[in-house]
């Protein structure tokens, strides 16, 4: 298998990163539960991506594969997504019937976030035409090497059960499950730091 190079994306590439992740999440159970209408999803998802992960550009932890087929946005310890904007976007665009479940999901997610310093992965994905070719693994290896150099844990919530085996292969452990009302299952996962390779 050909090695997949990964690098930090610049803020000038934000629209490219957003496009990759928007495509990758087009069939994601949680994304499409909260934004079920296709036109709404396409219109709102770039703003959700910005609210979830734009702070990654400030720490050079928005990553892309060199062929721009995959992207991941990691937030460093102490940096959080813009929860206020996320909540507003969902309240304005989701089916009103699920809004109480969405609020309960955000509350449950907050309970699982580790209290120890950790890198947080809110978004990772590959262009659907390129999935299954090792891009996700390359993105994970690149970011987790930084976590290990820092001696810091990594945390994510898997919104798609198909991705759990990938995360487990990279050392993430399931902490539990989150499911509220009509929502799909969200799986919080934590990876303790490993000694950095010398």
Image (spheres, rainbow, N blue to C red):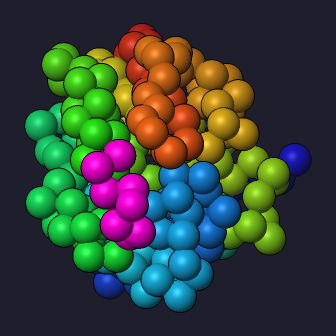
Q: Looking at the picture, how far across and down is residue 142, in whole percent?
A: 51, 42
**196 relative to 66, above or below:** above
**176 relative to 12, above or below:** above
**127 relative to 37, above or below:** above
115 or 61, which is in the foreground?
A: 115
Whether residue 186 appears in this view of the structure is yes
Whether residue 75 appears in this view of the structure is no
Place residue 67 in its image quadrant: bottom right
**Which residue corresponds to the image point at 31% horizontal and 57% vertical from the top-left?**
99
Is 143 displayed left or right of 39 in the figure?
left
Is 5 displayed left or right of 54 in the figure?
right
Is 32 covered by the magenta stretch? no
168 or 30, which is in the foreground?
A: 30
Is 99 covered by the magenta stretch? yes
Q: Which residues are magenta?
A: 94-101
**Which residue corresponds to the image point at 45% horizontal and 39% vertical from the top-left?**
181
**Which residue corresponds to the image point at 66% horizontal and 62% vertical from the top-left?**
27
**7 relative to 67, above or below:** above
Q: Residue furthest right?
A: 1
**Which residue corresponds to the image point at 50% horizontal and 45% vertical from the top-left?**
182
Q: Looking at the picture, how far across and down is residue 102, in whole percent?
A: 33, 50
Place residue 190 in its image quadrant: top left
| Dominant SS in magenta | helix
């Amino acid at each position: 298998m050909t090695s997949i190079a990964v690098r930090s994306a610049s803020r000038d590439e934000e629209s490219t990163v957003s496009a990759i992740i928007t495509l990758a999440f087009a069939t994601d159970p949680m994304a499409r539960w909260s934004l079920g209408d296709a036109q709404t999803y396409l219109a709102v998802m770039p703003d959700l991506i910005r609210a979830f992960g734009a702070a990654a550009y400030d720490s050079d932890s928005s990553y892309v594969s060199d062929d721009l087929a995959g992207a991941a946005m990691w937030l460093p310890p102490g940096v959080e997504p813009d929860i206020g904007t996320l909540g507003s976007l969902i309240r304005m665009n989701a089916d009103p019937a699920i809004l109480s479940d969405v609020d309960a999901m955000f509350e449950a997610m907050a309970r699982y976030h580790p209290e120890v310093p950790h890198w947080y992965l809110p978004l990772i994905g590959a262009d659907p035409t390129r999935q299954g070719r090792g891009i996700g693994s390359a993105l994970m290896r690149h970011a987790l090497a930084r976590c290990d150099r820092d001696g810091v844990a990594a945390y994510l919530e898997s919104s798609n059960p198909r991705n759990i085996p990938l995360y487990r292969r990279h050392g993430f452990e399931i902490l539990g499950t989150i499911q509220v009302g009509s929502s799909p299952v969200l799986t919080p996962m934590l990876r303790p730091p490993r000694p950095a390779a010398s």
